[in-house]
């Protein structure tokens, strides 16, 4: 068999943490001389970086693998590589069930791929390696951004030690492993030098950052130091855990204009019994106090949360308690997920189960409630001038550009439709006066 010409295509499924892994892998492959292509039909190597968090994500990953198999049969592909959380979760079982997979690597082994390809130049040999999920971020974190240069993700830790009963993350990503603060700051400086105007700090639990380091490192002090980087635009931190939100952290956010007044606070539920069965701390009362503390400390803060509905044993009364909580708290953004039982987690066998149909009904009801709340919350921006990161031309209008405020995280929240911006403004932060508000999106004009 002829040698591979070293053209490859990579697809990334799931969260931004997975995206950063792909960026590291792309850097390593490019450094070895491989050529990344944008069309899988032109690639001899197809890499699928999978997600295994919930059933829908698992199915999407399987579909992507099967699509890769189709390119092996009908395209140029001669080597199909599968990595990511689904690989770590199912390992040899997945490898054996899909013989078209040439290389399968777990979350702790994915950076072995360049060496494996170099030693298997024809792509004909099969290889499966799924070790412990103990991957440590290589320093200084060199990678090839797969996002626009002006907005980058920065992974500050790997793994999670919370052990929620519904979650597979500790088993596929391992326990918390924080990166040294000095190397995180060095990477942030590098991103700023390369043109990043927004840095999004991510981890499975960013609020746990530093808890495994035997000094006084924590998220608040990391943010404090990062805000002093010359030329930094916005710093946003995502994926926090409610009981780890400290007053020190809130004061740091309040004190620095470069730190987005945006708190991503996945609560999952508010009923104390359900939270206990989820192996999460808190109650409706404690969560109300936390939200009050956040809003009292940080004026105009934007709050995002996520909820799981249809968790085993959730009664209609407990669901209505969640609805009432949402009505009272008035979050800016809410993500809702019907419970997805994950084999190998404690919640998988909990009874009584709520039917998927009922869980989806409850999810739809929450989403409908939040629709009006988000519109109401967005109305507070009307006739105000806000800093907006310009991202590109609108797909719907030649006259408008799109962008985001500090209260709109990439991918998951709404956007701003901007009149008066130009091509030269892409990647810049402009002052925009908000002139119109719809359910999720804002409209405005550049305030020159």
Image: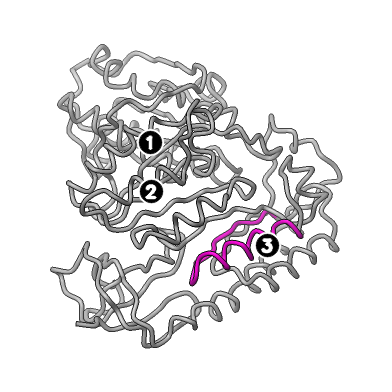
> Closer to us: mark 3 or mark 2?
2
What separation in Å lies between label 3 and label 2 (alpha carbons)? 38 Å
Is residue 301 covered in magenta? yes
Characterize the local packing of mark 1: few (<14), some (14-19) or many (20 or more) Cα atoms within 10 angstroms.
many
Considering the numbered disc 3 on the image, is that residue within a helix, a strand or a loop?
helix
In the rendered image, residue 282, in percent from the top left (x then y), is placed at 73, 50
Characterize the local packing of mark 3: few (<14), some (14-19) or many (20 or more) Cα atoms within 10 angstroms.
many
| Highlighted magenta segment, given as a residue range | 285-308
In the rendered image, residue 22, in percent from the top left (x then y), is placed at 34, 36
**Residue beneath label 1, please?**
68
- Would you say the residues marked 2 and 1 are in contact, meaning their CB atoms lie under 8 Å apart? no
Number of residue marks: 3
> Closer to us: mark 1 or mark 3?
3
Q: Earlier in the sequence, mark 2 or mark 1?
A: 1
Pick the residue in front: 119 or 441.
Answer: 441
Q: Earlier in the sequence, mark 3 or mark 2?
A: 2
**Residue beneath label 3, please?**
363
Tell me the residue at 45%/54% (across/down).
Answer: 252
Res. 104 image quadrant? top left
**Residue beneath label 2, please?**
224
Q: Earlier in the sequence, mark 1 or mark 3?
A: 1
In the rendered image, residue 103, in percent from the top left (x then y), is placed at 39, 21
Is residue 145 covered in magenta? no
- Would you say the residues marked 3 and 2 are in contact, meaning their CB atoms lie under 8 Å apart? no
């Amino acid at each position: 068999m002829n040698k591979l010409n070293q053209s490859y295509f990579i697809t990334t499924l799931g969260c931004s943490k997975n995206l950063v892994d792909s960026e590291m892998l792309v850097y390593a492959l490019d450094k070895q001389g491989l050529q990344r292509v944008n069309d899988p039909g032109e690639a001899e190597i197809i890499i699928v970086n999978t997600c295994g968090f919930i059933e829908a994500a698992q199915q999407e990953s399987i579909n992507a693998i099967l699509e890769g198999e189709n390119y092996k049969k009908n395209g140029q592909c001669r080597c199909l590589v599968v990595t990511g959380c689904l690989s770590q979760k199912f390992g040899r079982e997945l490898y054996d069930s899909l013989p078209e997979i040439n290389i399968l690597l777990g979350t702790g082994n994915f950076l072995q791929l360049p060496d494996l390809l170099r030693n298997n130049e024809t792509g004909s040999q099969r290889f499966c390696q799924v070790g412990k999920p103990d991957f440590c971020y290589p320093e200084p974190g060199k990678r090839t951004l797969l996002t626009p240069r002006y907005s980058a993700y920065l992974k500050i830790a790997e793994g999670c030690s919370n052990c929620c009963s519904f979650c597979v993350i500790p088993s596929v990503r391992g326990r918390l492993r924080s990166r040294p603060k000095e190397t995180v700051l060095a990477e942030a400086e590098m991103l700023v030098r390369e043109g990043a105007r927004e840095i999004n700090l991510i981890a499975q639990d960013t609020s746990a950052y530093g808890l495994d380091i035997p000094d006084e490192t924590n998220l608040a002090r990391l943010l404090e130091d990062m805000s002093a980087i010359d030329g930094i635009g916005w710093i946003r931190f995502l994926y926090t855990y409610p009981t780890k939100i400290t007053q020190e952290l809130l004061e740091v956010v309040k004190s620095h204009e470069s730190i987005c007044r945006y708190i991503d606070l996945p609560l999952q539920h508010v009923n104390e019994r359900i939270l206990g069965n989820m192996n999460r701390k808190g109650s409706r009362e404690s969560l109300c106090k936390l939200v009050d503390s956040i809003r009292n400390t940080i004026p105009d803060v934007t709050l995002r949360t996520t909820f799981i509905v249809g968790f085993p044993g959730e009664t209609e009364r407990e669901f209505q308690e969640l609805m009432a909580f949402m009505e009272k708290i008035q979050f800016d953004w809410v993500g809702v997920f019907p419970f997805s039982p994950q084999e190998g987690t404690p919640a998988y066998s909990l009874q009584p189960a709520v039917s998927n149909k009922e869980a989806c009904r409850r999810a739809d009801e929450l989403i409908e409630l939040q629709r009006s709340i988000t519109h109401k919350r967005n109305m507070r921006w009307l006739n105000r001038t806000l800093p907006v990161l310009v991202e590109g031309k609108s797909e719907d209008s030649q006259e408008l550009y799109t962008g985001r405020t500090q209260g709109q995280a990439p991918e998951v929240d709404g956007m701003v439709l901007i009149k008066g911006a130009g091509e030269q403004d892409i990647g810049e932060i402009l002052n925009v006066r908000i002139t119109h508000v719809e359910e999720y999106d804002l409209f405005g004009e550049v305030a020159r």
